[in-house]
Amino acid sequence: MSRSAQLVPATALLLVGALALTACDGGVHGTPGGSGPRDPYFPKSGNGGYDVTHYALDLAYDPDGNRLSGTATLTARATDDLSAFDLDLDGLDVKSVTVGGDKARWNRTGQELTVRPHDDLDEGRTFRVTVRYSGTPRTITDPDGSEEGWLPTEDGAVALGEPTGSMAWFPGNHHPSDKAPYDLTITVPEGLQAVSNGELTASRTSGGRTTSTWHTAEPMASYLATLAIGDYDIRRSTIPGIEGASDGGLPVYTAVDPSEAAASRKVLAQLPGIMKWAQAAFGPYPFSSTGAIVDRQGDAGYALETQNRPYFPGTPDTGTLVHELAHQWFGDSVTPKTWRDMWLNEGFATYAEWLWTEDHGGDSAQQTFDALYDHGDDVYDDLWDFPPAKPSSAAHLSDSPVYQRGAMVLHKIRQTVGDKAFAALVRGWAAAHRHGNADTDDFTTYVEHQAPDKDFTPIWDDWLYGDGKPERA
Protein backbone atom coordinates (compact mmCIF):
# COMPACT_ATOMS: atom_id res chain seq x y z
CA MET A 1 0.00 0.00 0.00
CA SER A 2 1.01 3.58 -0.49
CA ARG A 3 -1.04 5.93 1.65
CA SER A 4 -0.99 9.69 1.75
CA ALA A 5 1.08 9.51 4.18
CA GLN A 6 -9.72 -9.53 20.82
CA LEU A 7 -10.16 -12.80 19.73
CA VAL A 8 -13.13 -12.85 22.09
CA PRO A 9 -15.03 -15.93 23.17
CA ALA A 10 -18.31 -16.55 21.38
CA THR A 11 -21.12 -14.60 22.93
CA ALA A 12 -23.65 -16.32 25.11
CA LEU A 13 -26.16 -16.01 22.31
CA LEU A 14 -23.87 -17.83 19.89
CA LEU A 15 -23.12 -20.53 22.41
CA VAL A 16 -26.76 -21.09 23.18
CA GLY A 17 -27.57 -21.07 19.46
CA ALA A 18 -24.85 -23.60 18.71
CA LEU A 19 -26.02 -25.86 21.52
CA ALA A 20 -29.61 -25.64 20.37
CA LEU A 21 -28.65 -26.51 16.83
CA THR A 22 -26.49 -29.41 17.94
CA ALA A 23 -28.94 -30.91 20.39
CA CYS A 24 -31.17 -32.27 17.62
CA ASP A 25 -28.38 -34.52 16.32
CA GLY A 26 -26.91 -37.59 17.96
CA GLY A 27 -23.24 -38.50 18.07
CA VAL A 28 -21.92 -34.97 17.79
CA HIS A 29 -18.12 -35.03 17.92
CA GLY A 30 -17.09 -31.65 16.51
CA THR A 31 -16.75 -28.24 18.10
CA PRO A 32 -17.43 -24.76 16.70
CA GLY A 33 -14.52 -23.27 14.79
CA GLY A 34 -12.89 -20.19 16.27
CA SER A 35 -14.15 -16.74 15.34
CA GLY A 36 -10.63 -15.45 14.68
CA PRO A 37 -6.96 -16.54 14.45
CA ARG A 38 -5.95 -14.16 17.27
CA ASP A 39 -4.35 -11.55 15.05
CA PRO A 40 -2.67 -9.03 17.38
CA TYR A 41 -4.32 -6.04 15.68
CA PHE A 42 -7.51 -7.43 14.12
CA PRO A 43 -8.50 -10.33 16.38
CA LYS A 44 -11.98 -10.74 14.85
CA SER A 45 -10.73 -10.95 11.26
CA GLY A 46 -10.38 -14.45 9.91
CA ASN A 47 -11.64 -17.65 11.47
CA GLY A 48 -10.40 -20.95 12.83
CA GLY A 49 -11.12 -24.57 12.01
CA TYR A 50 -10.78 -24.57 8.24
CA ASP A 51 -8.62 -23.48 5.33
CA VAL A 52 -10.20 -22.02 2.18
CA THR A 53 -8.86 -23.59 -1.03
CA HIS A 54 -10.98 -21.69 -3.58
CA TYR A 55 -13.41 -18.78 -3.88
CA ALA A 56 -16.10 -18.62 -6.57
CA LEU A 57 -17.96 -15.30 -6.55
CA ASP A 58 -20.95 -14.61 -8.80
CA LEU A 59 -21.95 -10.96 -8.36
CA ALA A 60 -24.26 -8.36 -9.88
CA TYR A 61 -24.07 -4.63 -9.19
CA ASP A 62 -26.46 -1.77 -9.93
CA PRO A 63 -24.66 1.57 -9.49
CA ASP A 64 -27.90 3.58 -9.58
CA GLY A 65 -29.15 1.94 -6.41
CA ASN A 66 -25.70 1.01 -5.07
CA ARG A 67 -27.05 -2.52 -4.71
CA LEU A 68 -24.93 -5.66 -4.79
CA SER A 69 -26.22 -9.23 -4.98
CA GLY A 70 -24.06 -12.28 -4.93
CA THR A 71 -23.54 -15.96 -4.51
CA ALA A 72 -20.25 -16.89 -2.87
CA THR A 73 -19.12 -20.51 -2.98
CA LEU A 74 -16.11 -21.37 -0.86
CA THR A 75 -14.30 -24.68 -1.07
CA ALA A 76 -12.47 -25.41 2.15
CA ARG A 77 -10.75 -28.14 4.14
CA ALA A 78 -11.64 -28.69 7.79
CA THR A 79 -8.57 -28.46 10.03
CA ASP A 80 -10.60 -29.58 13.07
CA ASP A 81 -13.70 -31.65 13.69
CA LEU A 82 -16.33 -28.97 13.20
CA SER A 83 -19.91 -28.70 14.37
CA ALA A 84 -19.99 -25.05 13.20
CA PHE A 85 -17.72 -22.48 11.63
CA ASP A 86 -17.63 -18.72 11.05
CA LEU A 87 -17.30 -16.56 7.96
CA ASP A 88 -16.54 -12.82 8.00
CA LEU A 89 -19.27 -10.68 6.43
CA ASP A 90 -19.87 -7.07 7.45
CA GLY A 91 -23.33 -5.83 6.44
CA LEU A 92 -25.40 -7.21 3.53
CA ASP A 93 -28.39 -9.49 3.98
CA VAL A 94 -27.91 -13.26 3.92
CA LYS A 95 -30.67 -15.12 2.09
CA SER A 96 -29.51 -18.72 2.41
CA VAL A 97 -26.53 -20.89 3.29
CA THR A 98 -25.81 -24.45 2.17
CA VAL A 99 -22.94 -26.78 3.04
CA GLY A 100 -22.32 -29.64 0.64
CA GLY A 101 -25.61 -28.83 -1.07
CA ASP A 102 -27.63 -29.27 2.13
CA LYS A 103 -29.39 -26.41 3.85
CA ALA A 104 -27.42 -25.13 6.82
CA ARG A 105 -28.56 -23.11 9.78
CA TRP A 106 -26.85 -19.82 10.41
CA ASN A 107 -26.92 -16.73 12.59
CA ARG A 108 -25.09 -13.43 12.71
CA THR A 109 -23.37 -11.36 15.36
CA GLY A 110 -21.48 -8.33 14.13
CA GLN A 111 -19.17 -9.36 11.31
CA GLU A 112 -19.47 -13.06 12.18
CA LEU A 113 -21.70 -15.29 10.05
CA THR A 114 -21.86 -18.54 12.04
CA VAL A 115 -22.78 -21.58 9.96
CA ARG A 116 -24.05 -24.87 11.39
CA PRO A 117 -23.93 -27.59 8.71
CA HIS A 118 -26.49 -30.39 8.66
CA ASP A 119 -23.75 -32.90 9.53
CA ASP A 120 -20.53 -32.35 11.42
CA LEU A 121 -17.39 -31.94 9.32
CA ASP A 122 -14.53 -34.33 10.08
CA GLU A 123 -11.01 -32.98 10.26
CA GLY A 124 -9.40 -33.24 6.82
CA ARG A 125 -12.70 -33.23 4.96
CA THR A 126 -13.09 -30.94 1.96
CA PHE A 127 -16.44 -29.17 1.93
CA ARG A 128 -18.25 -26.48 -0.02
CA VAL A 129 -20.26 -23.66 1.55
CA THR A 130 -22.52 -21.45 -0.57
CA VAL A 131 -23.90 -18.13 0.69
CA ARG A 132 -26.53 -16.12 -1.19
CA TYR A 133 -26.70 -12.48 -0.14
CA SER A 134 -27.63 -8.97 -1.28
CA GLY A 135 -27.93 -5.39 -0.11
CA THR A 136 -26.04 -2.12 -0.02
CA PRO A 137 -22.37 -2.84 0.62
CA ARG A 138 -20.65 -0.82 3.31
CA THR A 139 -17.74 1.55 3.25
CA ILE A 140 -15.55 0.69 6.24
CA THR A 141 -13.42 3.23 8.07
CA ASP A 142 -10.04 1.88 9.18
CA PRO A 143 -8.62 2.53 12.64
CA ASP A 144 -6.30 5.03 10.91
CA GLY A 145 -9.25 6.89 9.38
CA SER A 146 -8.84 5.58 5.81
CA GLU A 147 -11.84 4.24 3.92
CA GLU A 148 -12.01 0.78 2.37
CA GLY A 149 -14.51 -1.92 1.60
CA TRP A 150 -17.01 -0.79 -1.04
CA LEU A 151 -16.39 2.75 -2.28
CA PRO A 152 -19.02 4.16 -4.67
CA THR A 153 -17.61 6.37 -7.45
CA GLU A 154 -19.25 8.78 -9.89
CA ASP A 155 -19.79 6.03 -12.46
CA GLY A 156 -19.58 2.82 -10.42
CA ALA A 157 -17.60 1.58 -7.45
CA VAL A 158 -14.27 0.19 -6.34
CA ALA A 159 -13.70 -2.53 -3.75
CA LEU A 160 -10.50 -2.30 -1.69
CA GLY A 161 -9.64 -4.62 1.15
CA GLU A 162 -6.60 -3.72 3.24
CA PRO A 163 -6.82 -4.64 6.02
CA THR A 164 -10.46 -5.71 6.57
CA GLY A 165 -12.54 -4.25 3.74
CA SER A 166 -13.10 -7.40 1.70
CA MET A 167 -15.70 -8.61 4.17
CA ALA A 168 -17.90 -5.71 3.02
CA TRP A 169 -18.56 -7.37 -0.36
CA PHE A 170 -18.15 -11.13 0.04
CA PRO A 171 -18.12 -13.65 2.90
CA GLY A 172 -14.84 -15.40 3.58
CA ASN A 173 -11.95 -16.12 5.86
CA HIS A 174 -10.64 -12.58 5.79
CA HIS A 175 -7.17 -12.87 7.23
CA PRO A 176 -3.90 -12.75 5.25
CA SER A 177 -2.83 -16.16 6.56
CA ASP A 178 -5.52 -17.93 4.47
CA LYS A 179 -4.85 -17.51 0.73
CA ALA A 180 -6.70 -19.15 -2.14
CA PRO A 181 -7.32 -18.90 -5.91
CA TYR A 182 -10.40 -16.99 -7.10
CA ASP A 183 -12.95 -17.11 -9.89
CA LEU A 184 -15.14 -14.02 -10.05
CA THR A 185 -18.09 -13.34 -12.34
CA ILE A 186 -19.59 -9.86 -12.27
CA THR A 187 -22.64 -8.47 -14.10
CA VAL A 188 -23.02 -4.70 -14.54
CA PRO A 189 -25.10 -2.39 -16.75
CA GLU A 190 -24.04 -2.33 -20.39
CA GLY A 191 -21.54 0.44 -21.06
CA LEU A 192 -19.57 -0.10 -17.85
CA GLN A 193 -16.46 -2.24 -17.43
CA ALA A 194 -15.74 -4.43 -14.42
CA VAL A 195 -12.08 -5.12 -13.70
CA SER A 196 -10.74 -7.59 -11.15
CA ASN A 197 -7.62 -9.63 -10.40
CA GLY A 198 -6.07 -12.26 -12.63
CA GLU A 199 -7.13 -12.76 -16.23
CA LEU A 200 -10.35 -11.89 -18.03
CA THR A 201 -11.55 -15.26 -19.36
CA ALA A 202 -15.00 -14.34 -20.73
CA SER A 203 -17.19 -11.33 -21.43
CA ARG A 204 -20.66 -11.12 -22.97
CA THR A 205 -23.38 -8.50 -23.27
CA SER A 206 -27.06 -9.33 -23.40
CA GLY A 207 -30.28 -7.60 -22.40
CA GLY A 208 -28.53 -4.42 -21.40
CA ARG A 209 -26.12 -6.14 -19.03
CA THR A 210 -22.46 -7.13 -19.41
CA THR A 211 -21.07 -10.16 -17.60
CA SER A 212 -17.33 -10.61 -17.16
CA THR A 213 -15.43 -13.53 -15.65
CA TRP A 214 -12.00 -13.20 -14.04
CA HIS A 215 -9.69 -16.05 -13.00
CA THR A 216 -6.91 -15.73 -10.43
CA ALA A 217 -4.92 -18.95 -10.51
CA GLU A 218 -2.33 -18.13 -7.87
CA PRO A 219 -3.22 -17.98 -4.15
CA MET A 220 -4.42 -14.56 -3.05
CA ALA A 221 -5.10 -13.06 0.36
CA SER A 222 -8.60 -11.62 0.44
CA TYR A 223 -7.36 -8.11 1.25
CA LEU A 224 -5.70 -8.08 -2.20
CA ALA A 225 -8.92 -8.88 -4.05
CA THR A 226 -10.41 -5.96 -5.95
CA LEU A 227 -13.30 -5.08 -8.19
CA ALA A 228 -13.40 -1.78 -10.07
CA ILE A 229 -16.60 -0.87 -11.91
CA GLY A 230 -16.92 2.16 -14.16
CA ASP A 231 -16.00 3.70 -17.49
CA TYR A 232 -12.40 2.78 -18.28
CA ASP A 233 -9.99 3.06 -21.16
CA ILE A 234 -8.81 -0.56 -21.46
CA ARG A 235 -5.38 -1.35 -22.91
CA ARG A 236 -3.89 -4.80 -23.46
CA SER A 237 -0.29 -5.60 -24.29
CA THR A 238 2.48 -8.05 -23.42
CA ILE A 239 5.96 -7.80 -21.96
CA PRO A 240 8.48 -10.14 -23.59
CA GLY A 241 11.35 -11.62 -21.64
CA ILE A 242 9.62 -12.05 -18.29
CA GLU A 243 10.68 -15.34 -16.71
CA GLY A 244 7.79 -17.77 -16.31
CA ALA A 245 5.57 -15.99 -18.85
CA SER A 246 4.26 -17.77 -21.92
CA ASP A 247 6.10 -17.54 -25.24
CA GLY A 248 3.85 -14.63 -26.12
CA GLY A 249 5.08 -12.64 -23.14
CA LEU A 250 3.52 -11.54 -19.86
CA PRO A 251 -0.02 -10.18 -20.39
CA VAL A 252 -0.57 -6.56 -19.33
CA TYR A 253 -4.10 -5.25 -18.68
CA THR A 254 -4.58 -1.63 -17.69
CA ALA A 255 -7.87 0.11 -16.94
CA VAL A 256 -7.70 3.90 -16.76
CA ASP A 257 -10.49 6.37 -16.12
CA PRO A 258 -10.76 8.55 -19.25
CA SER A 259 -10.16 11.68 -17.17
CA GLU A 260 -6.74 10.27 -16.19
CA ALA A 261 -5.80 8.74 -19.56
CA ALA A 262 -3.58 11.55 -20.86
CA ALA A 263 -1.77 12.06 -17.56
CA SER A 264 -1.27 8.32 -17.02
CA ARG A 265 0.06 7.47 -20.47
CA LYS A 266 3.67 8.46 -19.77
CA VAL A 267 4.00 6.83 -16.37
CA LEU A 268 2.27 3.59 -17.44
CA ALA A 269 4.63 3.40 -20.41
CA GLN A 270 7.34 2.67 -17.81
CA LEU A 271 5.54 -0.44 -16.58
CA PRO A 272 7.40 -2.94 -18.84
CA GLY A 273 10.76 -1.48 -17.85
CA ILE A 274 9.88 -1.53 -14.15
CA MET A 275 8.76 -5.16 -14.41
CA LYS A 276 12.01 -6.23 -16.09
CA TRP A 277 14.06 -4.31 -13.53
CA ALA A 278 12.05 -5.84 -10.66
CA GLN A 279 12.51 -9.35 -12.04
CA ALA A 280 16.27 -8.81 -12.11
CA ALA A 281 16.22 -7.47 -8.55
CA PHE A 282 13.66 -9.78 -6.90
CA GLY A 283 13.54 -12.93 -8.99
CA PRO A 284 10.90 -14.46 -11.29
CA TYR A 285 7.59 -12.62 -11.36
CA PRO A 286 5.15 -14.69 -9.26
CA PHE A 287 1.91 -14.11 -11.22
CA SER A 288 0.45 -14.78 -14.65
CA SER A 289 -0.36 -11.16 -15.62
CA THR A 290 0.27 -7.60 -14.57
CA GLY A 291 -1.20 -4.15 -15.14
CA ALA A 292 -2.86 -1.30 -13.26
CA ILE A 293 -6.19 0.27 -12.43
CA VAL A 294 -6.11 4.09 -12.48
CA ASP A 295 -9.32 5.70 -11.27
CA ARG A 296 -10.14 9.36 -11.05
CA GLN A 297 -9.11 10.99 -7.80
CA GLY A 298 -11.61 9.60 -5.34
CA ASP A 299 -12.34 8.81 -1.74
CA ALA A 300 -9.67 6.13 -1.30
CA GLY A 301 -6.76 8.58 -1.20
CA TYR A 302 -4.19 5.77 -1.38
CA ALA A 303 -2.75 3.28 -3.82
CA LEU A 304 -3.05 -0.42 -3.05
CA GLU A 305 -1.12 -3.47 -4.24
CA THR A 306 -4.19 -5.38 -5.43
CA GLN A 307 -2.88 -8.63 -6.90
CA ASN A 308 -1.88 -8.64 -10.60
CA ARG A 309 -2.89 -5.01 -11.12
CA PRO A 310 -2.40 -2.38 -8.41
CA TYR A 311 -5.06 0.25 -7.83
CA PHE A 312 -4.29 3.98 -8.01
CA PRO A 313 -6.76 6.76 -7.10
CA GLY A 314 -5.42 8.98 -9.88
CA THR A 315 -2.25 9.04 -11.97
CA PRO A 316 0.67 7.71 -9.91
CA ASP A 317 4.21 9.02 -10.02
CA THR A 318 7.00 6.63 -10.95
CA GLY A 319 7.98 5.93 -7.35
CA THR A 320 4.46 4.91 -6.40
CA LEU A 321 4.21 2.64 -9.46
CA VAL A 322 7.52 0.99 -8.49
CA HIS A 323 6.31 0.62 -4.91
CA GLU A 324 3.05 -1.14 -5.80
CA LEU A 325 4.62 -3.39 -8.43
CA ALA A 326 7.34 -4.41 -5.95
CA HIS A 327 4.52 -5.46 -3.62
CA GLN A 328 3.62 -8.20 -6.09
CA TRP A 329 6.68 -10.02 -4.74
CA PHE A 330 6.58 -8.64 -1.20
CA GLY A 331 3.07 -8.70 0.24
CA ASP A 332 1.16 -10.41 -2.57
CA SER A 333 3.34 -13.49 -3.16
CA VAL A 334 5.15 -13.44 0.19
CA THR A 335 2.22 -12.46 2.41
CA PRO A 336 2.43 -11.67 6.14
CA LYS A 337 1.16 -14.23 8.61
CA THR A 338 -0.36 -11.48 10.76
CA TRP A 339 -0.81 -7.73 10.46
CA ARG A 340 2.07 -7.26 12.89
CA ASP A 341 4.36 -8.33 10.04
CA MET A 342 3.21 -5.57 7.68
CA TRP A 343 6.68 -4.01 7.68
CA LEU A 344 7.79 -6.99 5.55
CA ASN A 345 5.41 -5.69 2.88
CA GLU A 346 6.03 -1.99 3.21
CA GLY A 347 9.70 -2.01 4.13
CA PHE A 348 10.56 -4.02 1.02
CA ALA A 349 8.32 -1.94 -1.27
CA THR A 350 9.80 1.28 0.10
CA TYR A 351 13.34 -0.03 -0.29
CA ALA A 352 12.45 -0.98 -3.87
CA GLU A 353 11.86 2.74 -4.49
CA TRP A 354 15.32 3.48 -3.08
CA LEU A 355 16.89 0.82 -5.31
CA TRP A 356 15.07 2.07 -8.41
CA THR A 357 16.31 5.61 -7.75
CA GLU A 358 19.84 4.33 -7.18
CA ASP A 359 19.79 2.32 -10.42
CA HIS A 360 18.35 5.16 -12.49
CA GLY A 361 20.71 8.04 -11.85
CA GLY A 362 19.33 9.37 -8.58
CA ASP A 363 20.54 9.21 -4.99
CA SER A 364 22.08 6.00 -3.82
CA ALA A 365 20.26 3.99 -1.18
CA GLN A 366 23.00 5.04 1.23
CA GLN A 367 22.33 8.71 0.50
CA THR A 368 18.60 8.15 1.00
CA PHE A 369 19.29 6.36 4.29
CA ASP A 370 21.60 9.13 5.51
CA ALA A 371 19.14 11.87 4.59
CA LEU A 372 16.34 10.01 6.35
CA TYR A 373 18.45 9.43 9.45
CA ASP A 374 19.62 13.05 9.63
CA HIS A 375 16.48 14.88 8.57
CA GLY A 376 13.68 12.32 8.43
CA ASP A 377 11.97 13.60 11.55
CA ASP A 378 11.53 16.96 9.80
CA VAL A 379 9.40 15.18 7.17
CA TYR A 380 7.92 12.34 9.24
CA ASP A 381 7.13 13.58 12.72
CA ASP A 382 6.42 10.01 13.85
CA LEU A 383 9.49 8.34 12.31
CA TRP A 384 10.97 7.21 15.62
CA ASP A 385 7.70 6.69 17.50
CA PHE A 386 7.82 2.88 17.41
CA PRO A 387 9.92 0.13 15.82
CA PRO A 388 8.84 -1.41 12.47
CA ALA A 389 8.08 -4.83 13.93
CA LYS A 390 5.97 -3.47 16.81
CA PRO A 391 3.40 -0.94 15.59
CA SER A 392 1.79 0.72 18.56
CA SER A 393 -1.77 -0.11 17.46
CA ALA A 394 -3.92 -0.95 14.45
CA ALA A 395 -4.30 2.78 13.85
CA HIS A 396 -0.57 3.04 13.11
CA LEU A 397 0.03 0.10 10.76
CA SER A 398 0.53 2.49 7.85
CA ASP A 399 2.69 5.03 9.63
CA SER A 400 6.21 5.94 8.54
CA PRO A 401 8.06 3.59 10.97
CA VAL A 402 6.54 0.61 9.10
CA TYR A 403 7.54 2.03 5.70
CA GLN A 404 10.65 4.15 6.14
CA ARG A 405 12.21 2.47 9.17
CA GLY A 406 11.34 -0.88 7.60
CA ALA A 407 13.43 0.12 4.59
CA MET A 408 16.20 1.28 6.90
CA VAL A 409 16.31 -2.18 8.49
CA LEU A 410 16.87 -3.68 5.04
CA HIS A 411 19.61 -1.18 4.30
CA LYS A 412 21.37 -2.03 7.56
CA ILE A 413 21.32 -5.68 6.48
CA ARG A 414 22.79 -4.68 3.13
CA GLN A 415 25.55 -2.74 4.89
CA THR A 416 26.32 -5.82 6.98
CA VAL A 417 26.46 -8.47 4.23
CA GLY A 418 27.51 -6.41 1.19
CA ASP A 419 25.74 -5.64 -2.07
CA LYS A 420 26.19 -8.99 -3.82
CA ALA A 421 25.07 -11.07 -0.82
CA PHE A 422 22.16 -8.72 -0.18
CA ALA A 423 20.91 -9.06 -3.75
CA ALA A 424 21.02 -12.85 -3.41
CA LEU A 425 19.30 -12.65 -0.02
CA VAL A 426 16.39 -10.62 -1.41
CA ARG A 427 15.86 -12.96 -4.34
CA GLY A 428 16.17 -15.98 -2.07
CA TRP A 429 13.61 -14.63 0.41
CA ALA A 430 11.08 -14.08 -2.39
CA ALA A 431 11.71 -17.60 -3.68
CA ALA A 432 11.66 -19.34 -0.29
CA HIS A 433 8.15 -18.10 0.56
CA ARG A 434 6.69 -17.73 -2.94
CA HIS A 435 2.87 -17.87 -2.77
CA GLY A 436 3.07 -18.44 0.98
CA ASN A 437 3.05 -16.59 4.29
CA ALA A 438 5.91 -15.45 6.49
CA ASP A 439 6.42 -13.50 9.68
CA THR A 440 9.25 -11.46 11.15
CA ASP A 441 10.79 -14.45 12.92
CA ASP A 442 10.88 -16.30 9.60
CA PHE A 443 12.71 -13.36 8.07
CA THR A 444 15.30 -12.88 10.81
CA THR A 445 15.99 -16.63 10.87
CA TYR A 446 16.38 -16.65 7.09
CA VAL A 447 18.83 -13.75 7.14
CA GLU A 448 20.93 -15.35 9.86
CA HIS A 449 21.09 -18.64 7.97
CA GLN A 450 22.17 -16.86 4.79
CA ALA A 451 25.03 -15.07 6.57
CA PRO A 452 25.97 -17.21 9.59
CA ASP A 453 29.27 -15.39 10.03
CA LYS A 454 27.58 -12.03 10.63
CA ASP A 455 26.11 -10.67 13.83
CA PHE A 456 22.67 -9.19 13.22
CA THR A 457 21.79 -8.75 16.89
CA PRO A 458 22.31 -4.95 16.88
CA ILE A 459 20.04 -4.60 13.84
CA TRP A 460 17.28 -6.68 15.38
CA ASP A 461 17.61 -5.09 18.83
CA ASP A 462 18.02 -1.45 17.79
CA TRP A 463 16.47 -1.05 14.33
CA LEU A 464 13.78 -3.72 14.06
CA TYR A 465 12.50 -3.95 17.65
CA GLY A 466 14.15 -1.09 19.52
CA ASP A 467 12.37 2.02 20.73
CA GLY A 468 13.51 5.49 19.74
CA LYS A 469 16.16 6.60 17.27
CA PRO A 470 19.02 4.08 17.08
CA GLU A 471 22.66 5.06 17.06
CA ARG A 472 23.94 5.33 13.50
CA ALA A 473 26.80 2.82 13.89
Image (cartoon, rainbow, N blue to C red):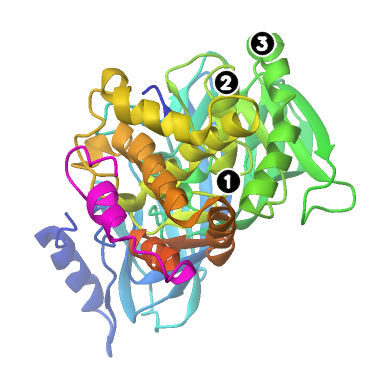
Observer-nearest residue: 458 or 194?
A: 458
For marks 1 and 3 on the same chain, the one whose residue lies earlier in the sequence: 3
According to the picture, the residue beneath numbered tag 1 turns out to be 328
Query: Does the magenta run of residues contain 462?
Result: yes
Q: Secondary structure at mark 2?
A: loop
Q: Which residues are magenta?
A: 449-473
The residue depicted at 56 percent of the width and 37 percent of the height is 355
Residue 179 appears left or right of 34: right
Q: Residues within 10 Å of mark 1 (few under 14, many from 20)?
A: many
How far is mark 3 from mark 2, CA to CA?
A: 9 Å
Observer-nearest residue: 15 or 139?
A: 139
Q: Are marks 3 and 2 in contact (CB under 8 Å)?
A: no
Say which amino acid is labelled 1.
Answer: Gln
Residue 283 appears left or right of 179: right
According to the picture, the residue beneath numbered tag 3 turns out to be 263
Q: Secondary structure at mark 1?
A: loop
According to the picture, the residue beneath numbered tag 2 turns out to be 316
